[in-house]
Image (cartoon, rainbow, N blue to C red):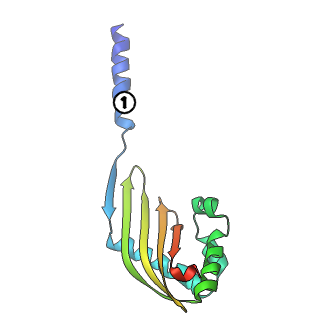
Amino acid sequence: MKKSAVYLLFTIIFLAIFSCTYHNVYINGEEDNKDGITLLNKFYNHIANKNLDSVDAIVSDSLKLMAGSNGISKMVVFINKKVGDYKSYKIEDHYIRRTTGSTNETSYNYKLKVTYDKGDVDEIVGFIRKDKSTIKLNSYHANSDLLMK
């Protein structure tokens, strides 16, 4: 009986040690911001060149499930019909959160003022990188009175 109690104790200790997770969280790292800005530039270059297939190629699977396989490119076409062609963007704020450890994930969130032919649109763009995969678009929101007309 005593032997089984010792085995049980070692099993519990073993499970406690190896089931633990650890994480380090970094907020708004400069290198992470450079990666995010690179993808922002790529995303808006695709929009400027009306390369909608490339826009859809960087959309994450979870966003494709919600918006449809070409939902983001349809939204881009709608915005272009309402406010004209894309001209430029200005970053108003950003929040980047990188988690390392048992899981590795970086989320990039940008609040932008995007200029089109007919005026400015407030946009929020989010990207995500899981482990060492490529960065994917996981959120896109556009808001302006110009889109209501």
| Amino acid type, label 1 | Phe
> Of 80 and 53, which appears nearest the observer?
80
Locate the N terminus by quadrant. Answer: top left
Q: Residue furthest front?
A: 149
As helix, strand or loop, the secondary structure at mark 1 comes to: helix
50 relative position to 120: left or right = right
Count of labels shown? 1
Image point (42%, 62%), residue name? 106
Does residue 43 appear to the left or right of 22 in the view shown?
Answer: right
Residue at 63% across / 59% down in the picture? 65
**Horizontal relation, residue 33 to residue 119: left or right:** left
Give the residue pinned by disc 1.
14
Residue 118: percent from left, percent from top: 54, 91
Residue 100 position, x and y percent, is 37, 56
* Of residues 17 and 70, the one drawn nearer to the viewer in this rendering: 70
x%, y% of residue 73? 64, 75
Identify the residue at image location x=66%, y=74%: 74
Query: x, y (%) of residue 90?
Result: 41, 84
| Badge 1 density bin: few <14, some 14–19, many ≥20, Cα 10 Å | few
**Up-down relation of residue 105 to residue 111 (above or below):** above
In this rendering, the answer to whether 117 lies above or below 76 is below
The residue sitting at 42% across, 74% down in the picture is: 111
Q: Toward the viewer: 131 or 1?
A: 131
Q: Locate the C terminus and report the quarter of the image it occupies.
A: bottom right
